[in-house]
Amino acid sequence: MVNDPLIRVRDLVQHIGGQAILRGLDLDLFPGETLVLLGKSGGGKSVFLRHLIGLMRPISGSIVFEGQEITGLKERELEPMRRKIGMLFQDGALFDSMNVFHNVAFPLRERGESDPDVVREKVARSLAMVNMTGHDHKMPVNLSGGMRKRVALARAIISPPDVILYDEPTAGLDPIVSDSINRLIRRLQRELNATSLVVTHDMTSCNHIADRVALLHEGKIYFLGTPHELRASHDPVIRDFVHGRSGETVY
């Protein structure tokens, strides 16, 4: 791991509806690693991801991507940075009116690629990487939850990104499909040499894919370390999360 982070976040603050969601979050993401961001549902993990691609702007704080501060950039100025980042949204965010082929091809066409041979070749390669070859003409409504995630991931990597952001990639999936998604995340990290940030509350996924783990608690990074260090911690907040306990007294 090199000393310079690919993404450096400092003192990030965000309020939504009068509620403090991020309260001075600090985090570094280093080239080539898979960092898992854990936290309770509704705790701000997805909000944090949206800041990294400029879909939300913080009240205060800094986000530096490849040495450039991005929090003050305009939409047009964000585009070169966004081309380097692939995003897998929690629900896949597929276009229901488009088949698999056109969903995956969408980013290429948005960026001006008009050569049909180039589009076909890149779509075929992306679908092959996520084990979805042969499903080009299916509509999203005819796909299982796991297949929808794979198609959305094929779209995210159609132009091989430097960074892949995953928002709850195994949410709503059964354990077997979740395991296949976890293996896919690891394989894509190796094959694309991509840096990955995976937002989840799934400890099984964390144990399978994480190089490092960060725990978001009350709007700040409460823990940062290896999966082994997380599991070995005796801190009550960490142990309650790892073992799925609410921490509340039962009468």
Image (cartoon, helix red, strand yellow):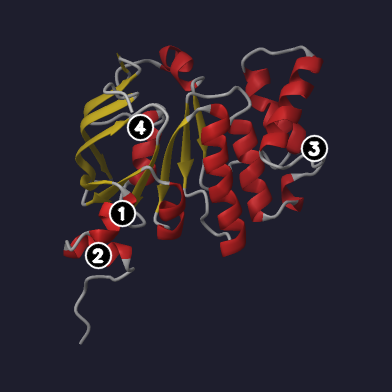
SS state under label 2: helix
**Relative horizontal placement of residue 202, taking residue 179 as reference (left or right):** left
Residues under labels 1 and 3: Cα distance?
41 Å
Disc 2 residue crowd, few under 14, some 14–19, many 20+, Cα 10 Å:
some
- Kindly identify which residue carries mark 4: 51
Q: Which numbered disc, 1 or 4, marks the residue that appears first in the sequence?
A: 4
Foreground pick, 198 / 230: 230
Disc 1 residue crowd, few under 14, some 14–19, many 20+, Cα 10 Å:
few
Give how far across and how far down residue 79 sits, in percent: 48, 16
Residue type at the position of mark 3: Asp
- Kindly identify which residue carries mark 2: 239
Residue type at the position of mark 2: Arg
- Kindly identify which residue carries mark 1: 228
- Which residue sits at x=53%, y=49%? 182
Residue type at the position of mark 1: His
Foreground pick, 118 / 50: 118
Disc 3 residue crowd, few under 14, some 14–19, many 20+, Cα 10 Å:
some
